[in-house]
Amino acid sequence: MHALCVCLLMLCANTAAGDSAIDLISGFDQTRLEKSYPPTEPEGLNELCKLLYRLRNVDESRLQRIATASPASTIGDAVQDTGQLIDLKRVLVPATLREYLGFESIYFLEIERDGKPFLVITSRVPPEAQSGDRIDATGILLSSAEDSETKAIACGEVGWFANRPMSSGEKLLLSQNFNMSLLAGLATRNRLPLTPSDGDAFYTMLATANQIASLEELPNPTFADPVTFLRDGKDAIGQWVQMEVDGVQITKIAVSSAERQAQLGSDHYYQIDAIGDLGEVVVKIEGVNEQEPVEFKTRYPVSIAVRELPAFLSKDATDSREYDGSIVRPLRGKLLMTGFFFRLWSYESEFMQQKGSKNQFGPLLIAAVVENLEPNAVRSIGVEKIGSFAALAIICGILGIWLWQRSTNRHDDQAKRKRMNQQAQNVSFDLPANLNSDHNSGPHQEPQDEAP
């Protein structure tokens, strides 16, 4: 804990500089900004709430670039600052503005850096934020320390970093400059469909995971299965995990929004639908309209998002199909996924609809690395080539039998010749002793016919 506090103080050591950002705020000028703070009158509070609404749509990266140009000294200048949260106060948005603005409260955060307090005003604060947490603010200057007792900054949202021991996954994300405050609201949407509120965290984490994949050294992941997240989905958000799954299908999903493309660094990503092992655990999902619970035994669906496919999955299959602009193709084989747990999410499922139950919910993981667990032999030849290799094996077998028979026949012939030679050496050509000697001398004469 002491080391974390020291780290926070080091990170809080410097305040960035800035320049005017009024041009980024639609409908506001210097005069209108001055009316918004301090919000001592009803009109001032109205203007401040409208300003925070406008700041929600300002590109924070542009504010950051302006903030590094020159020191922030005038109302409307872009500014960055960071420190530890001391206190937080909530103020209700006037009732006449709530429906128009889309939020009910604004927050006044008292922040301290190097013993000096300043104020951050925003409409978005993680509900888990508490005293001692680190807060990063990128926004516009509403008052400087020279003009009033306390410097005040208005921003669309704040960066939040909990003052607690971080998991290895959170530390890994933080090392890649991931805004940890994006994770704060995920737990409140546990088991719900993905919404626009998830977008910033989802696309930014996808891009960060893709960067992490190229790192030479990565922390050891925690081995997980679907039960890990079904039991403890809220507390597992952002954890660095590894899971073995069986592939079902891959979907290439197009990203049309320019804002999301900028966050992702691509105009598409991939969703891998897979099945994870439950072991001996039986998962029951309550039915609707007095339907029987749906049971999952041995296996449970898992969703994996990845920005880029590994080489062994990147080849397009011949049976790919297109649905609503997304390209879907089947996937078979065991995979090893290493990445981050995003949250439990809900989605439509034909299986659950057939059971007359609610939407399917399951773990949504964001992969940094996807590996092939199939044997090399199967991966190298492919199922489509097995028939050809089997035919070749048969031909080789026939040729081998022919060569063996030929060799055997040759050896048989050699043995026969050798046996005949041995028999010829043992034959005697000596004449019988009772034959006349004259028969052995002189020329051979033909027998003469005797006279009658």
Image (tube, grey):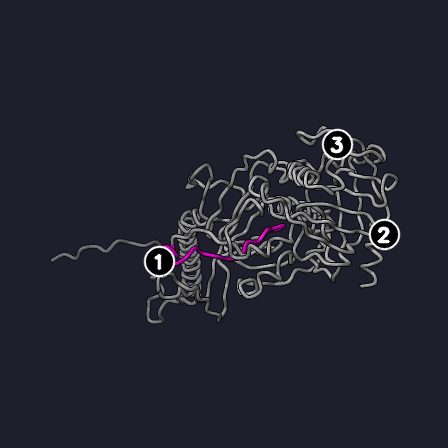
Tell me if residue 354 is in the magenta stretch: yes
Q: Is residue 362 visible?
A: yes
Total labels: the figure holds: 3
Tell me the magenta residue range. Answer: 351-370
The x and y percentages for residue 376 are 55, 54
Element class at badge 2: helix
Tell me if residue 247 is in the magenta stretch: no
State which quarter of the image contains the C terminus: bottom left
Quarter of image, res 255: top right
Element class at badge 1: loop
Q: Earlier in the sequence, mark 3 or mark 1?
A: 3
Closer to the camera, 102 or 190? 102
Q: State which mark lies toward you, 3 or 1.
A: 3
Q: Residue at x 86, y 48 (%)?
A: 13
- Look at mark 3 in the image and give the residue it sits on: 21
CA gap, disc 2 and disc 1 = 56 Å
Quarter of image, res 352: bottom left
Rendered position, 162 above or below 197: below
- Look at mark 1 in the image and give the residue it sits on: 356
Closer to the camera, 319 or 374? 319
- Look at mark 2 in the image and give the residue it sits on: 10
CA gap, disc 3 and disc 1 = 54 Å
Amino acid on which the number 2 mark rests in the picture: Met
